[in-house]
């Protein structure tokens, strides 16, 4: 389970449900990865806009190049957990990843 929680509201519950289902069925393919990237990018854009900061300002807060922030927001960047954590911290959010046993198998 991956959960991005932000102070002041919002989480990735739809993304979390999708990922849980995909992992449970071991069915992550290229389209799934694209969907996951888009889900993450949408959440980042939404939170950045809620905070009223630009990509350049987010870049300054994270130390990540503005061009890479743009790629992440366009779902054109294979984001690492470390980069996601930097962005989440700058957006006053936390990333939570949980692996759960699949007792139905």
Image: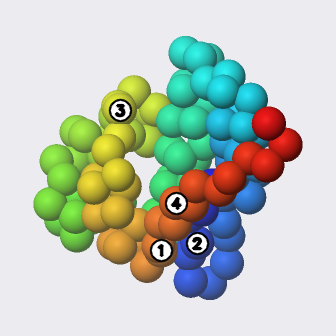
Q: What residue do we see at 67% from left, 70% from top?
A: 10
Q: What residue do we see at 32% from left, 44% from top?
A: 80
Q: Foreground residue, 74 or 39? A: 39
Residue 53 visible at all:
no
Q: Residues within 10 Å of mark 1 (few under 14, many from 20)?
A: many
Q: CA distance from mark 2 to mark 4?
A: 11 Å
Left or right, 14 with reference to 51: right
Q: Which residue is mark 3?
A: 78
Left or right, 29 with reference to 24: left
Residue 24 image position (x, y, % from top left) = 72, 37
Q: CA distance from mark 3 to mark 2?
A: 21 Å
**What is the secondary structure assignment of the residue under circle 4?**
strand
Q: Which residue is mark 2?
A: 5
Residue 53 image position (x, y, % from top left) = 38, 67
**What is the secondary structure assignment of the residue under circle 2?**
strand
Q: Foreground residue, 14 or 54? A: 14
Left or right, 18 with reference to 44: right
């Amino acid at each position: 389970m991956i959960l991005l929680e932000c102070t002041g509201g919002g989480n990735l519950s739809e993304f979390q449900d999708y990922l849980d289902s995909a992992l449970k069925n071991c069915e992550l393919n290229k389209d799934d990865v694209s969907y996951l990237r888009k889900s993450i990018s949408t959440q980042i854009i939404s939170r950045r806009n809620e905070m009223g900061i630009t990509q350049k300002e987010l870049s300054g807060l994270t130390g990540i190049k503005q061009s890479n922030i743009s790629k992440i927001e366009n779902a054109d960047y294979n984001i690492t957990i470390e980069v996601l954590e930097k962005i989440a911290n700058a957006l006053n959010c936390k990333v939570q990843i949980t692996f759960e046993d699949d007792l139905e198998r």
